[in-house]
Image (tube, rainbow, N blue to C red):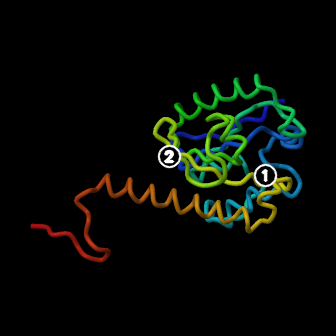
């Protein structure tokens, strides 16, 4: 069973996981593993105004968020994926990004990021130098409890909040570029004749 991506045109952020877990594939929702804090992280970082759970994943586009995986095949763990799984996934992900045109592509974990850009891609979370179809690239820690590098909720939340600040800055820059004559201080009315 294939787990459908949660997509919308021009999302603020396209989150890209590695692949669906067996649990996610069985229940038909992303990040459905017991105790996976992905949706709590989205709420705590300010991406969504109310708490969500995995059953709400189809609502992410309401908030300008999209969600997919670099590999479509569900597995017990990512180590079971093959080079062919990733090769197919890279091509599909590139087509998805070109079609929906996100402002930011946020890879959920370094593995997804390196599988897309190659093994020499810089490691660790944060903003990355690459661009994909005009989208900036960011890596957040994988929310899985198996992530030994970022074991606690707060350890992961730091990076989700940094991503939120980044998208807020990008959106403010875009808004200013659409209205370049409006460089007044807040609360100061523009001159009109």
Earlier residue among tags 2 and 1: 1
Please give the count of numbered marks on the rendered protein: 2
The residue positioned 62% from the left and 45% from the top of the image is 122
Local packing at callout 2 (Cα closer than 10 Å; few below 14, some 14-19, many 20+) is many
Q: Nearer the viewer, residue 174 or 91?
A: 91
Q: Is residue 59 left or right of residue 190?
A: right
Specify whether 125 is left or right of 37: left
Q: Residue at x 75, y 56 (%)?
A: 38
68 with respect to 27 (left or right): left
Kindly identify which numbered label has been placed on residue 165: none
Against 114, residue 60 (above or below) is: below
What SS does tag 1 mark?
helix
Would you name the residue on which mark 1 appears? Answer: 54
The image quadrant where one finds the N terminus is top right
Secondary structure beneath dot 2 equals loop
Residue at image position (78%, 52%) is 54
- How would you rate the neighbour count of disc 1 (Cα within 10 Å): few for under 14, some for 14-19, many for 20 or more? many
Image spot of residue 94 (x, y percent): 58, 30
Per the image, the residue denoted by label 2 is 103
Q: Position of residue 181 (x, y in %)?
A: 22, 59
Give the Cα distance between marks 2 and 1.
23 Å
Residue 189 in picture, x, y percent from top left: 23, 73
């Amino acid at each position: 069973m294939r787990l459908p991506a949660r997509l919308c045109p021009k999302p603020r952020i396209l989150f890209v996981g590695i692949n669906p877990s067996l649990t996610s594939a069985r229940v038909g929702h992303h990040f459905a593993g017991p105790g996976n804090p992905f949706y709590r992280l989205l709420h705590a970082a300010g991406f969504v105004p109310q708490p969500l759970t995995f059953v709400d994943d189809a609502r992410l586009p309401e908030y300008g968020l999209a969600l997919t995986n670099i590999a479509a095949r569900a597995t017990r763990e990512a180590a079971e994926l093959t080079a062919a799984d990733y090769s197919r996934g890279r091509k599909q992900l590139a087509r998805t990004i070109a079609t929906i045109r996100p402002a930011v592509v946020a890879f959920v974990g370094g593995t997804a990021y390196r599988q897309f850009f190659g093994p020499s891609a810089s490691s660790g979370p944060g903003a990355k130098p690459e661009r994909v179809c005009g989208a900036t690239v960011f890596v957040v820690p994988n929310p899985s409890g198996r992530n030994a590098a970022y074991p606690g909720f707060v350890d992961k939340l730091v990076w989700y909040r940094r991503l939120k600040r980044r998208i807020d800055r990008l959106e403010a820059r875009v808004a200013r570029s659409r209205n370049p004559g409006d460089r007044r201080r807040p609360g100061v009315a523009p001159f009109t004749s």
